[in-house]
Amino acid sequence: MRTKEKIIKVPFIGDLIYSSGHTIVGILLGIFTGGLLIAISGVNPFLAYASMFRGAFNSLQSFSNVLVRSSPLLLGGIGVAIGIKSGVWNTGIEGYMYIGAIGATIVAIPELGLPPIIHILLCFIVAMLFAGLWGAIPGYLRAYKGVNEVTATIMLSYVAIYFTNWIVSGSPLAQEGAYFPMSLPFAKSSLLSILMKGTSLHPGPFIGLLMCIIFHIILKYTPFGFRTRMLGHNPFAAQYAGINSKKQIVITMVIGAMLGGLGGAIEVLGLKHRLYMEFVTGVGYESVAVALVAGGEPIGVMLSALFFSILKVGGATMSIETGVSSSMASIIIALCVLFVIGVGVADSKRLKKRDEKDPGKKTLSFKMEEAVK
Amino acid sequence: MNENSILLKMQDISKSFPGVLANDHVTIECEKGHVLGLLGENGAGKTTLMNILYGLYQPDQGKIFVDGKQVVINSPSEAINHGIGMVHQHFKLVDTLSVIENVILGIPTNKAVLDFGPAKKKLEKLCKEYELFVDPEEIVWRLPVGKQQWVEILKALYRDCKVLVLDEPTAVLTPSESDQLCRAIRKITEQGRSVVFISHKLREVIEITDKVTVIRDGKVIGTVNTKEATQSILAEMMVGRPVTIERKARPIIKEHSAVLVMKNVNAFDDRGVQALKDFNLTVHAGEIVGVAGVDGNGQRELSECIAGLRKPSSGSITIQDKQVTNVIADPSFVGFIPEDRQKTGLVLDFTVAENLLIKDYKEKPYVKNGFLQYSEIKKHAEHMIKKYNIKSPSGDIKVKTLSGGNQQKVVIARELDAQPVLDVASHPTRGLDLGAVSNVHDILLNERNRGAAVLFISAELQEVIALSDRIIVLYSGQIMGELDGETADQFTIGQMMLGQTTEAKK
């Protein structure tokens, strides 16, 4: 049966078939190929992977590192996923994280005399507001002007990164004479509390997991989710059913941006306690990969974000213990993503071929006819 | 006939897509220096056949001969090497490149640096030869559509094609450009090249071609010498259906208030060509108004304007005295069966239950406290499946797994169950088998008897005659004539479909 499968249109790549089976095969292939690379670099891949596993699960502390690492990936991943559901690729999470963090920084630095919970909430709200407005720009351009959202969001991410650089080096918020560009320290009341002694575990990952569950419910059980899915599956039918698809695109991109902004705010409030230059290098782009491996499913985002963080945290241990290059973890992640995409694309091509030969079995046929038109 | 003079032969070609036999043992022949017309309605299989010739599809069976030699064409580049040039209905030009760049694009060269000089000279020579003038330096997107077509033709001639395929070339041309195209085609054939001319416009086909092959429902209906053909012979071959559909008895409806009133409506199609011209139409309660006409004469824009999916450029459309803007969202007011159920009418990856509610999903009782009530949605689906006899095991299966007829029933159930005052049915029987067709007819007739105003758009003459109280014939965005459904005959409608009024005929 092919009912559990679905087709995702990936920009510049084409249709790919997605199912949990495809994903697992892709990830296993990625891990296998990563093992080959480790072997080529002269290390026993079994020892290396064992060390990676230990690094992630050896102690409560190491696992709390995994959780902390997953926090921005969860929030960023769900932000991208909701876009995928409505048929847009909101790839600007990196930028939203910076803009959100700037928003949080503005209200986090001054001592406002508020109780911590209120101060933190205020930081969150301002962060989401900033990021949401930022996300409205590519959303508007995509919906009303037909500008490709992938290009627009990525270019805007660079604007956000350089804007942050100015904030932490030239603006009134910057710490003067610092060894590294950073903002003034945050007020105590704005900092997220540490949940476990001796670790840096803050509530961020749990907020992320909660958001995944909330958006799973929203997408599945609310009229808003119904509209979003309809738009993603068939924009023509959505328009025909009276949905204002332009508005819907802007809304989903703004929501994705707000989640990214929240992720950025949590990073600075929970972990860094200041705004630093380039504090989330690449995490925003990793969230796109997280959402892709999850096939745009919020529950899948939970699993793939954790998987990515296990590789990242375990990869550091692997590098220290076995001498494998420290970038090996990123390489393995990239391989997994490539193989998940590759397996999906190859399978969709195979099915298209088969459909052409044997029309009795219907799977992709209608998509194919569409593409031909 | 001398076998050697056949430049292109496609023999016994069959090609099927899921659920559709697009080409059914089709054979066409084109002689050297001749123009072969390929005539058929939209969806008859003309474009599929040409895509096979150009290597975009592989046929399930059949052979292709070029110049007497059998060839296998796996890709467009192989087709070009065999001397086949094609101008697609939708141009395949790179908008941001110049004309000359587009023309030489894809031609292998062993030079490191492109030298446009000789290419430009060759192109200018071609321009002069065929009187298809374009500036080689102009960027393609700045050219009007007609000129873009010249570029496509010149591109094929530059590659020295033996057979030039033109897919609906005049759809985007002004009358004077069409004349220019005719002259160019004559010059092309004088040099011993052949042209395959695809169209559903009879007049042009008769004017330009030497022979015409008519295709209907994927089959070749016949090939005639153009000299011996008349428009009405071709029209009958093109739209005549082998099965007769009986006109059913119907009660007379007393109440006859005007429901849909269109006044001086003008509208443009997606390409920016005017599709409706000062269009006036009134549809009353309790009548079926059939819209006959060759596809592409404004039917689609007409239905979309009424449904609020397309904005008329001027004029007014009212339904029960209410100005129409976005009635599409309200199925209790207007029921709209769109012409392409898979592309527009359904979300194929949604379940039957969800598809039944893509318009009503936010209404009570399907939503309570902001959450979708799947138990209610399911109950509704089960009710509709029973009421409209949809052959689906449950509401939980994806609509794409249903047959075409049952998919259409899902659309009809959703659109008509709320008893709208106006039904717009656009090609509701297209692609359905006979049983499903008669089912759709019964439903529309019941709608009329209930007192709804029904606008029934179809390209199939017999069903228009069988079902309509009143028939209007659409030709290039205007009403060519209006007939009474009881007394209308195919011949008269056929004449009007070609743009001739009965008076003008004599």
Image (cartoon, coloured by chain):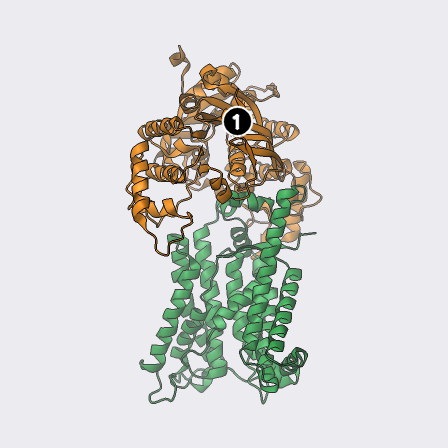
Q: Is residue B460 left or right of residue A168?
A: right
Q: Quadrant of residue B130?
A: top left
User: Which x, y percent locates residue B451?
Assistant: 54, 27
Q: Which residue is mark 1?
A: B29
- Indicate whether B38 appears above or below A209: above
Disc 1 sits on a residue from what chain?
B
- The image shows residue B130, relative to residue A192, as above or below, that is above
Residue found at x 33% / y 38% = B147
On the question of residue A83 being in view, the answer is yes
Does residue B131 appear anywhere in the picture?
no
In the structure shown, which secondary structural element does the residue marked by tag 1 occupy?
strand
Res A105 → quadrant: bottom left
Q: Nearer the viewer, residue B192 or A194?
A: B192
Chain letter for orange? B
Residue closest to the eye, B282 or B98: B98
Give percent across and percent down for residue A197.
Answer: 59, 89
> Residue B260, position in %: x, y?
44, 30
Residue at 30% x, 44% y: name it: B120
Q: Is residue A130 left or right of residue B287?
A: left
**A98 lies above or below B439:** below
The chain coloured green carries which letter? Answer: A
How many numbered discs, if any?
1
